[in-house]
Amino acid sequence: MIASTPQAAVPSPPLLPETSYLQDRALVLAWARAHGIREDRCADVMQETFLRLTSTSPAFPTRAAQVAWLRRVSSNLCVDWLRQNPVLTLTFDRAALQREEITEDERRGLIEAMRDLSEMQRLVVIAKTVESLTFARIAADLEVSIPTAKTHYRRAIDTLRARLAGTPNQENAS
Amino acid sequence: MKNLTCQEVDELLPDYCTGESDPETARAIELHAADCAACSREIAQWRAAAGVLRRASMQSPARDIPRIAVARQKPSRLFAVAASLAIVFFLGTAAGRWSARPASPGENQPSGDSLVARYKNAAIASPGTSSLGLALLSLARRE
């Protein structure tokens, strides 16, 4: 688990893009990996995310807003790529499979679930599982209520469970 | 401690499965799950699903090695061209040696069923055909 900025009483200011790159790139890589995509593509997503941060130079009110922006941009890049590329079905690299704790079936289910989820569902479930942020913090980052954040999390987990079981989640698919 | 219903447990799952429940609520959920197979299974599935996502974030998925491996196993176009040229060269050489060997009596006129005769006949019958094609024709044609 990778910790992002700790919740402070006084909101901390955003970092310069160069400093953010040094501090947040491991976090962006972890977010990308949580989408189940290939490692080389995770690195591409990380670079593209910071390229956009540098080129667009958005003005963030707080550091938390900056991290939330990075999370949103990287997640959208991952899903754009997943929707344009088919999932690889063949695997002959047995040694690599044995090293991985996540199986190919789990990875395929994860990718399919990520394709199905809405942006808010993705952002909530990633913030919760990768960074272990509280629902209160996630709700503040996404500017939604805490019950709404919990509902997004519930639907994301339901979709992921259905995909891991090999069946699409009808509620989320509709 | 309040006894929870399945409905109440279901509503509390996001907090409980992510460790945000207060200790008293967590204890009540565990007591209920101990006697309720459906809720116990539900909790296990929630944790398993979140666990997959967490593990994926910490581990790098395998690269697309199969795609490269499959590509390398395919015979290249260069190999196919080289193999065709080798066959043509071999057949051409064999046919040349056959025709250049000392002629035996009565062999000045190609007999109808010799390989060279069939090759020559194929060349006359099919002008413009490659050496490989003529060789194959002469092998296949029996007069």
Image (tube, coloured by chain):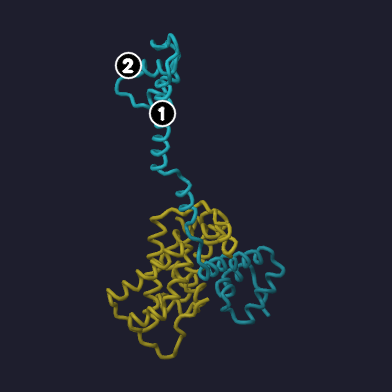
Chain colours: A yellow, B cyan
Instruction: Give the residue at x 34% y 81%.
Output: A18
The answer to whether A126 is drawn above or below residue A15 in the figure is above
Q: Residue furthest top?
A: B106
The local secondary structure at tag 1 comes to helix
Q: Which residue is mark 2?
A: B124
How many residues crowd around disc 1 within 10 Å: few (fewer than 14), some, or many (20 or more)? few
Q: Let me know if residue B143 appears in the view.
A: no
User: Foreground residue, A127 or B22?
Assistant: A127
Alpha-carbon distance for marks 2 and 1?
A: 20 Å
Q: Residue furthest right?
A: B35
Q: Position of residue B48 (x, y in %)?
A: 60, 66
User: Foreground residue, B111 or B40?
Assistant: B111
Q: Position of residue A68 (x, y in %)?
A: 39, 76
How many residues crowd around disc 2 within 10 Å: few (fewer than 14), some, or many (20 or more)? few
Question: Is residue B37 found left or right of A167 in the rendered image?
Answer: right
**Disc number for residue B93:** 1
User: Foreground residue, A46 or B14?
Assistant: A46
Camera-near label (2 vs 1) is 1
The answer to whether B85 is drawn above or below residue A108 in the figure is above
